[in-house]
Amino acid sequence: MKNLLQILCWLACLPISFPLASSALAQNKACNPAPPEVAKLIEIRPSYHIVQGPLAEFDPCHSSVDLSMPSFFADKLGTKPPLMLIAHGGGGAGMAEKEMARRMNAQGVATLLFDAYELNGFKYRGSMLFVNGVTNESRQRMIYKAAFTAYQWVAKQNSIDTTRIFINGLSNGGSVAVNLAATVDPTHVRMVFAEGASPSGLGLPDQLKVPLWLIYGKLDNYGGKTADDWMLSRTDPCSFNVDFFMTAAGTSKRCSSLFNPQDMVITPQAWADELKSRGQPIEIRHYEEAAHGILLGPINRKQVTYGSGPMAKVRYAWTGSGSGVPERFIQDLMTAIKASY
């Protein structure tokens, strides 16, 4: 009997996953494959790249796409479940993103996860190419276009509550999520949760259309030059930014590789304070005993190397969180989601 109960408890936590590369979708002409000339990597210094060329849109039939419904025994939050769209970080759809999907499914929330790099035809699994060999703006452009078109697709699906879509992003995905908060339709999207967002890449928008949580671990120094170079107070040269045509007006219109490249980007803290002073729906959420990626396991005080050879750059990259922090994090997200009812 004890073994049976253990099996039942295990099954209760399993999400119901629907791989979208199905013949039914193909017959319904839902597929949207990338064009042959999609995205190319261009080396700008040893082992460091930018991405050029047209970028892929979301393709519901792609093998990396996973629409997961709540587990059978999860709480029912409505006639149809709300959905969280997950924008992955710089390393692609990995452990943290899959753990977010698992935890959300167990709480009654459907999830949509995909890999923007794979959508663009890159076969990178097993390598660190996109973690430390590609610029922030290149990663964010690919993730943003895939995420925005995924949002447009999911807002038309009958299996979920299309008036309760939430967006989550980590790291580069967090920067994408911040920019999505300025372009999505509040008829569909209720709130955006951006974790560990960098101020550089696509820049930061001037106006928000939906409420935004900026989420940071107090030990988040990912990409920092020193151990106390915290992401929340991070600044970089404006030359790190690109004004991307799909994003709303923001800092990259005034601070980019083309506009005032010698200046420095605004820090996430100063940007949030400025928006809040104008009555914008933004809130900063801090988590003690947490670094970059709350769901990335125990705290790991590591460093990463960008590029190679004499131009290689070593940076701090603490990740993970302490005992009980992931549970508090998910509980806070669920409190916000349930407040939409």
Image: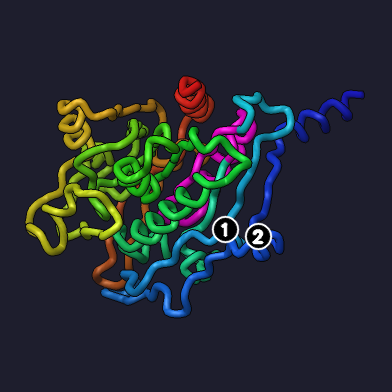
Residue at the location (50% across, 65% down)? 119
User: Relative to 83, is 299 on the left or the right?
Assistant: left
Q: Which residue is mark 2?
A: 25
Q: Is residue 175 above or below residue 188?
A: below
The percent position of residue 48, horizontal first and vertical second, equals: 32, 70
Residue at the location (64% across, 61% down)? 28
Give the number of marks: 2
Pointer 1 local density, CA inside 10 Å: few below 14, some 14–19, many at least 20: many
Residue range of the region highlighted in magenta in the rendering: 81-110
- Marks 2 & 1, CB-CB < 8 Å contact: yes
Q: What color scheme is it?
A: rainbow
Q: Quadrant of residue 226?
A: top left
The percent position of residue 301, horizontal first and vertical second, equals: 40, 43
Q: Quadrant of residue 177?
A: top left
Q: Quadrant of residue 232?
A: top left
Give the structural element (helix, strand or loop) at label 1: loop
Pointer 2 local density, CA inside 10 Å: few below 14, some 14–19, many at least 20: few
Residue at the location (34% across, 59% down)? 141
Specify whether residue 225 is in view: no
Q: Which residue is mark 1?
A: 60
Residue at the location (49% across, 45% down)? 86
Q: Is residue 302 above or below residue 166?
A: below
Q: Residue furthest right?
A: 1
User: Relative to 2, is 191 on the left or the right?
Assistant: left
Give the structural element (helix, strand or loop) at label 2: helix
